[in-house]
Amino acid sequence: MTIVRRLCCDTLAGLPDAVRRPDFDPATIGTGIVHLGIGAFARAHLAWYTQPLLRDDPRWGILGVSLRRADTRDALAPQDFLYTCAERDDAGERLTVIGAWAGVLVAPEAPGAVLARLADPAVRIVTLTVTEKGYHRAGASGGLDTDDPAIQRDLTAPAVPRTAPGLLVAALRLRRAAGGAPFTVLSCDNLPENGSSTRRVVTDFANRLDPALGRFVAEHVAFPNCMVDRIVPATTETDRARIDATLGAEDRWPVVCEPFAQWVIEDRFPLGRPAWELTGAELVDDVRPYEAMKLRLLNGSHSSIAYLGQLAGWQTVAEAIADPALAAHIDALMQEIASTLHLPASVDLAAYRRALLARFANPALHHRTAQIAMDGSQKLPQRLFAPALARVTARRAAPRIALGVAAWLRFLQGRSDDGTALQVDDPKADTLTRAVRAAPDAPALCNAIFAMCDVVPSALAESDSFRNEVLTALDQIATMGVRATLAAMA
C-alpha cells in the first residue's frame, strides 16, 4: 500500500472507524501542563490519562519540551502534534490518535520561549520524564551533583538553562518575581520518592543561586510523589509501517505500549489538576508503598531479565521469559523481593506478581533487553540494591537478587556467553569500563564496583554475605553461562 496522506487534523475524519480519535478539536486546547522530556513514555502515559478529560476541560492541554533534540518536534509539527498510541498484546492492536499536546518546544533552540511558557500563570503543573540521569543527582546523597559540568554551566548562566533543574529554578524565579503562584512539579520518572528527590535537587540548585529563592522553593512549591507504570518499548520501523497501513495515513512518530497502565499520585496540587481519577489514576496520601512495589518487583525484575538476557542472547523480554528456567527465577526473585515490601492490606501482592509475569510474556511488545539494560548505575540502586540491603538488614539471604547484580557485573565486561560484544550505555560508562579493565579477577571487579558509594549503599557493600552471594553467582555465570546457571537454580 502507498501511503500518501499525513496524519493531521485535516485527515482525522477519514481514518478507519476502528481508530479512536480525540472527541475535541486539538487546535482549541490550552496549555495547563508543561512537560519536560517528551519521550515515548510520556506520550503513552501522561497524554493517555489526560486526553479523555480535554473535551470537558480544554485548559489542561500539554506543551512538550525537549531538553536535547528536535526530532520529536520535527516529526509531530507537520501532524498538528497528533500521533498514534498503539496498545498491543496477543489479542491484537488497538489504535488511538492522541491530540493532547498543544505543541513542542526544543529547549536548546529557544530557552527564552520555554521559560516564557513556564512563567505563564495558565501553566499550573510541570511534569517530567527525563530519566534518572536527567535529575543530576549526586548518587547516595541524593542532592544536586554540583560537579556535573551541565549543572556548573547552568549555575554560571542561569538565564539560559539547559538542564531540568536549571529550567525549573529559572521559571520559578520568574514567577516569584512577578508575584505569581508557583506551579506544581510532578516527576513521572522511576526515582525513589520521585517528588521528594526532585524537590531536593531543585532546592539545592535554587540555594546555589540565591538562598531566598531556595527558601521559596522549599516552602511554597509542591512536589507530589507518584508511581507510573506502563511498558513502552522503542517504536520500530516495522511498527510504523504496520500502523500506517491500518491508518491509511503516515504517522512519523507513533508509540507502542501494552494495554496495562497504572498511575498512583499523591494528591497535592495547590493550583488544581486534571481529574485524572476519572481516567483510572489512583489519588492517595502516600505513594511510597506502591512505588517500592513497582520499582522492586517490576523494574527489578526487568533489569534482571535485561542483563541475564543480554548475556544469554535473549533479545526481548518475551523471548527471555519464555524460557522456563528464567521464568522460574523471576518468580522466585519477586518472592524474595516481596519480603522487603510494606503494603496496604488492600494490595493483592500475589495477583500483582502473576500479572507481571503475564505482562512480561506479552509477545506483541518486543521490549528489547538492550533498551532496559541502559543506565544500570542509575537504575540498580533502587531496583536491586535497595531490596538487597533490606534482606541483609533482616539477616536473610538474597541469592536471586545477587544473580541479577552478578549478571550486571558480567555485562559490564562487554561480552555475552557466546562471545558477542555488548554495548555498555551508561552515564558512568567510562568509570565502569576503567574498573573492569583494572580488575584482574572477579573479586577485584566486585570490590571496585561495590566501592562506588553512589551506586551501591555502603551498608550493603560492607556485607560479606551479600558479596559472597554475588561472587558465587558471578563465578557460575562465567564458568557455566546464564542458561546452565538458571537451570542449576531451578
Image (cartoon, rainbow, N blue to C red):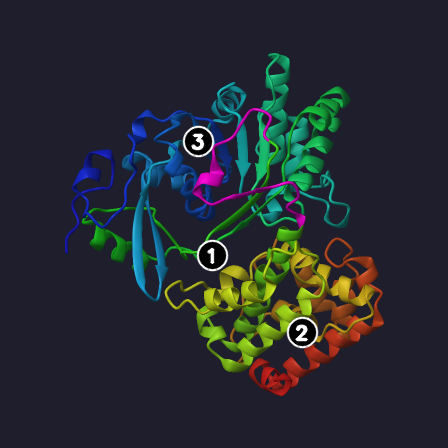
Instruction: Give me the disc on residue 411.
Output: none
**Quarter of the image holding residue 93?**
bottom left
Are the two marked residues, 3 and 1, in contact with CB atoms closer than 8 angstroms?
Answer: no
Query: Which residue occupies 68% across, 61% down?
Result: 432
State whether residue 361 is above or below residue 141.
below
State whether residue 315 is above or below residue 162.
below
**Where does the image place residue 246, in percent across and percent down from the top left?**
22, 54
**Where does the image place residue 203, in percent across and percent down from the top left?**
71, 31
For badge 2, the amino acid type reads Arg
Q: What residue is disc 2 on?
A: 400
Q: Earlier in the sequence, mark 3 or mark 2?
A: 3
**Where does the image place residue 236, in percent across and percent down from the top left?**
36, 57
Instruction: Give me the disc on residue 63.
Output: 3
Which tag is nearer the camera, tag 3 or tag 2? 2
Q: Which residues are magenta?
A: 269-288
Which quadrant of the figure contains the N terminus? Answer: bottom left
Q: What residue is disc 1 on?
A: 231
**Quarter of the image holding residue 158?**
top right
**Where does the image place residue 487, in percent across and percent down from the top left?**
58, 86
